[in-house]
Image (cartoon, rainbow, N blue to C red):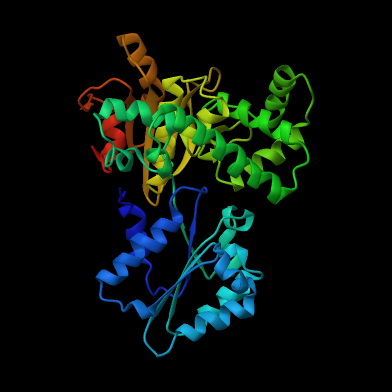
Amino acid sequence: MEIKRDLYLNKLVARKHNKLIKVITGIRRCGKSYLLNNLFCRHLQEQGVDEKHIVKLALDSVANEHLHDPLALYNWVTSQMSDSGDYYILLDEIQLVNNFVGVLNGLLQLPNADIYVTGSNSRFLSSDIITEFRGRGDEVRVYPLSFAEFCSVYDGDKASAWRDYYTYGGLPLVLLQQSDEAKESYLKGQLANVYINDIVQRNNVQNLPQLNVLTEIVASNIGSLTNPLKLSHSFKSMANSSISDKTIATYLGYMEDAFLVQKSRRYDVKGKKYLSSPSKYYFVDLGLRNAALNFRQQEEPHLMENAIYVELLRRGFSVDVGIVTRGDSSDQRAAEVDFVANRGSKRYYVQSAYSMPTAEKEEQEKRSLTGIKDFFKRMIVVGDYIKPKRDESGIVTMSVLDFLLDEDSLDF
């Protein structure tokens, strides 16, 4: 079974020979290595690149441990380049090399080297990775499977696919598990032994039980406005022990650096400024979110909201929580827009509303959108399976399946 990842493959293709180090980042087990070593390598071969001009190395293989020395790796790569033709250097798990930044910057000086790397440590998973290369890095962020990618290899109808997707998420290897029990076991094992363990080892976390409880609390509150102080109160009531808001803020930063969760800040649409705490947190993969809760809390409205958020990120948008003030200066009321999605000169306002069974509920969901006075597009995504429609004020209502499956759904 092969899953096409054309969005990311096309990004790599568009970056060929741009004189920068192409850095593929993303949560572990999301398919970075497969993208580089299989899909991109095959593209190069189909374009007529001689195999001798594709220098590919898996640095996590025991056979290549001797190349973790920076000079040894540099000498090995350059020894593979026997002529003046263009070479594609594909290095997987580059973080295992001491002083990998120096090695890559050295290779970048070669006029015929086009460099692509993946990595899985705190420096490669942090938001400021590009500064490691002093402006010479070009990041391609990879997410777990989108719902469209998931459906492309799913054996069943779209409704069943959606239930499986919001339950078990989009890590590619989940699709190879043959039963629900196997999927749950895989995800719980990955969360504990890979993601949480990585955070502990990278950051020398001394209190694993605290980190586990915090992960569970964040998972149970996806899409809710919160801050470290509020989370510390929740921690005390849930775990019957204390943890400072400063420690929680530090742990949240670790979780963000590992791409396990992502924070969405509040944005004042009218005032055109960011607001201070609270913020919202979402999981990058729904299966890992559910694993943190032992698959107990399956609230589809919250899971749908999380899926919409990650899909907007995958499409290249920066995503904030919108605050819209209504009324005059003496009686101002604030309404919330779930997502303000920005990319270049484009902006979209997206509301996640699982169900609008009555006219009153529909009016309630539209209230924040009708309070926006600019001319950017506005949309409500619902859990009901309806045909897309647009009302007289220009607000589009669309089912979550249509939204997720159509790459151009925002421009309906």
* Residue occupying the far bottom of the picture: 83
Q: Is residue 127 above or below residue 185?
A: below
Q: Is residue 332 above or below residue 165?
A: above
Picture coordinates of residue 13, whole percent (x, y)? 33, 65
Picture coordinates of residue 174, whole percent (x, y)? 42, 38
Circle count = 0
Q: Is residue 275 above or below residue 80?
A: above
Write the residue at 51% across / 84% down: 78
Between residues 160 and 257, which one lies in front from this camera angle?
Answer: 160
Write the residue at 37% across / 82% down: 86
Between residues 114 and 52, which one lies in front from this camera angle?
Answer: 52
Asked whether the viewer can see residue 34, the reply is: yes
Query: Which quadrant would the C terminus be assigned to in this image?
Result: top left
Write the residue at 35% across / 67% down: 41
Which quarter of the figure has residue 106? Answer: bottom right
Left or right of residue 60, residue 337 in this image: left
Write the residue at 59% across / 57% down: 128
Picture coordinates of residue 59, whole percent (x, y)? 55, 66
Between residues 157 and 354, which one lies in front from this camera angle?
Answer: 157
Which quarter of the figure has residue 338? Answer: top left
Q: Is residue 196 above or below residue 83?
A: above
Between residues 89 and 59, which one lies in front from this camera angle?
Answer: 59
Picture coordinates of residue 399, whole percent (x, y)? 28, 26
Asked whether the viewer can see residue 338, the reply is: no
Left or right of residue 26, residue 389 in this image: left
